[in-house]
Image (tube, grey):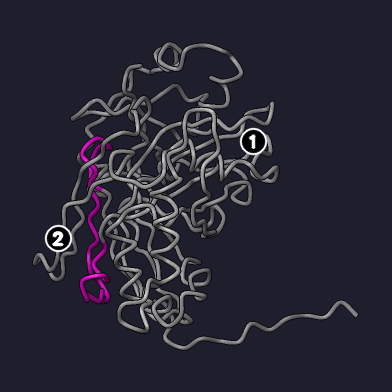
Amino acid sequence: MDIIKLIQLRHATLGRRIALVDEPMVTLLDSSVTSSYDFVTEALASETAIHDFLMARLSAESMAYDPIYNGESPWQLLPAFDHPTNPFACLVSGTGLTHHSSAKSRQLMHLKNVGNLTDSMKMYQWGVEGGNPPLGSIGVQPEWFYKGNGYILKAHGEPLEVPPYADDGGEEAELAGIYLVDQAGTPVRIGFCNGNEFSDHLMESKNYLYLAPSKMRECAIGPELVMGLDFNEFRGEVSVVRQEEMMWRKPVKSGSAHMAHSLANLEYHHFKYPTHRIPGQVHVHFYGADAFSYGEQVRLAEGDKMIIHWEKLGRPLINTMKSGAKVDELVALKQIC
């Protein structure tokens, strides 16, 4: 299959469109297709090969990619994939303890008595031993976490906010898998994109049972959705820039060659739940991290730039960290009677 790279765009007066990336240009699809969700939904319904369906909808409108990517164009980048009309129909989730280095970082974070094996490392080891079952078999289930619905998805160039109830904010460079459930209730893997699974590592470090609330944060995907790649090998780099100076950087590796679980096993354990197979539902799923700055005692600050670049996934995803309100306010509830 040919590799396809798509971006989603929004214009103040022209609305939403999608475009095919052909460096250094992008070409808009015709105006009848206003989102990647609609494009994929129509392609599946047509039973036409995705490349042929795409070529039939390309317009003659091409633009330079640089001004769009740099935020200097009337066209603004959107998250690489979303549900265009119903953010509640988009589930954002992830899988942890899939890479040895992240499991080791969690081990150190949670270790109370030197020499003991934490639950995190035990779960990682279960993946090593049973996360790559023979084809057609079911392996051990991985750790799984919920991040939120489509409202938390941010695009390249947008800040990721640390809310007042958070202890911290930190990048996690991950591959994000994009899925759509078809009208028959069958999950369809659409492609992959750069992901920043922004999390609150300081909160989690207090107690591993705080993992769930530490994940309830904004995150970013994009700028490009890449279709047609296999999952075996991904390499890239994650870095943090403070006041235009490189503060921290690290090579990252992912894909089946570097993970305890096979992609098929991760997908099965996500989509085995009937509530994850509702027709029309979008899933953005993070596959785990190989390196993150918090694991090396780096604490991000206001304005720090987080740069995530997987070599096969197009241009880097760049977001800055933003502090929200300083004081947490009690949410006032109403009573119906």
Q: Is residue 111 above or below residue 148?
A: below
Amino acid bearing label 1? Gly
Instruction: Say whether residue 163 is visible.
Output: yes
The residue sitting at 83% across, 80% down in the picture is: 335
Q: Amino acid at mark 2?
A: Arg
- The structure residue drawn at horizontal position 61% and vertical position 87%, both measured from the top left corner, is 330
The overriding secondary structure of the stretch rendered in magenta is: loop
Nearest to viewer (mark 1 / mark 2): 2
Query: Of residues 59 and 281, which is closer to you in this image?
Result: 281
Confirm whether the magenta stretch covers residue 293: yes
Image coords of residue 277 (percent x, y)? 66, 38
Residue 20 x, y percent position in the rendering = 34, 26
Residue 294: percent from left, percent from top: 27, 71
Quarter of the image for residue 12 reads top left
Quadrant into which the C terminus falls: bottom right
Magenta highlight range: 292-316
Q: Disc 1 marks which residue?
A: 280
> Where is mark 2, residue-wise?
249
Q: Earlier in the sequence, mark 1 or mark 2?
A: 2
Callout 1 crowding tier (Cα within 10 Å): few <14, some 14–19, many ≥20: some
Residue at 51% x, 60% y: name it. Answer: 147
In the rendered structure, the answer to whether residue 201 lies left or right of residue 48 reads left
Q: In what quadrant of the picture does the N terminus appear? A: top left
Mark 1–mark 2 Cα distance, whole angstroms, equals: 39 Å
Residue 10, visible in the rendered structure: no
SS for tag 1?
Answer: loop
Q: Which residue is outermost to the right?
A: 337
